Structure formats: structure tokens, C-alpha cells
Image (cartoon, grey):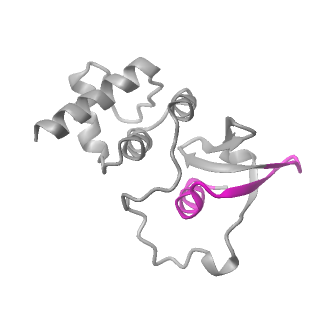
Amino acid sequence: MDATTAAEFVLANKGAEITLLLTDGSELIGNLISVNSKGINIKVDGKTRSVSLSRIEDTTSELDEDDELTGDEDFGYDGDEADETTDEDIYAMLEDGMSTRDLADVISDHLKIKLEPKELRVHLRALGLGVGKGRQYSLSATEFRMVTDRINAEATAS
């Protein structure tokens, strides 16, 4: 599975129960959480698992075929997410290492705001967490809280 296909699948099915058919012939069934540059994050039996894109052969979801992607969807944040991502889910995703875009998406979901990668880089620089081309972030829980606290503080000051 390529990253573009994975991103479209996740955006269309976030929170839904999905089945991942893996290249070794096994299946993994759980609720879809997110995607990053390395793989898909899925909650199976209460635990978050990250599955590498290279190990995914096919995906299916509980959505009817009528609800499949048509190519006309707007994948922007709509402010009405039905599922709640817990801090534990987020910390599990952060261990994998994320691009600025992936991290901005996670923070956007967590804070229920729209955060652009460019804006996130400003906050990361201010906190001394560094930025750079191709940089992968593996933030600790403390660092993640520092970043979200800073973003919240700036949003309330505006």
C-alpha cells in the first residue's frame, strides 16, 4: 500500500472498524485511528498497533460500498469528530516518529483545531525541539504536552 492510498483510506474511514489483510496472509481487525508516513495506526483489543504500509496488502472497512471514495471529498478538518483519541493513543503514535505534517494532524485532532505544519514548526523552534527537512519527531509525552500547551496559550491570547 502506498502512502497516498493509505491517507485517503484513513481520512474516509477514521474511527470505523477495518480489516487489514497483511502480506503474510493474516488479518488484523480493529478501529482505525490514523496514518503517518510509516504506517496505519489501528486499535485492536484496546491496544494501539502500528502496521507498516509495506506489510498491508489490502484494506476493507465497515462502510457500505456506496460510501467509498469518489475523489470529490474535502478532507479538511470539519470540527465534528465522533471518535475521541486518548492521550495513550497519541503517545503510542508519537513513538514511531512523525513528519511535521503527521504531527500537525495529530495535534489538530487532539485540540480540535486546524494546525498547519508551518505554524507547528514555529512552535517547535520556540520550544527548542528543532526542525529540519526530513526531520522525524518522536516526542515524549512531556514534549507533546509542552507543544499543545504552547499552542493553546497562543490561541487563547489571540
> Taking 49 as reference, is 126 above or below it?
above
> Residue 73, percent across and down?
46, 73
Residue interval drawn in magenta = 2-28
Which is more toward the observer, 148 or 100? 148
Quadrant position of residue 153: top left
Number of labelled discs? 0
| Residue furthest left as drawn | 158
Which is more toward the observer, 54 or 28? 28
> Residue 147, percent across and down?
31, 28
Which is more toward the observer, 58 or 156? 156
> Taking 58 as reference, is 42 above or below it?
above
> Residue 131, percent across and down?
31, 29
Residue 51, can we see it? yes
> Residue 24, percent across and down?
87, 46
Instruction: State which quarter of the image contains the N terminus.
Output: bottom right
Residue 131, can we see it? no
Does residue 112 appear to the left or right of 136 in the view shown? left
Instruction: State which quarter of the image contains the C terminus.
Output: top left
User: Measuring 24% from the left and 28% from the top, which residue is drawn there?
Assistant: 150
User: Measuring 38% from the left and 40% from the top, which residue is drawn there?
Assistant: 107
| Residue furthest right as drawn | 25
Quadrant position of residue 8: bottom right
Does residue 145 appear to the left or right of 26 in the view shown? left
Quadrant position of residue 126: top left
Q: Is residue 142 magenta?
A: no
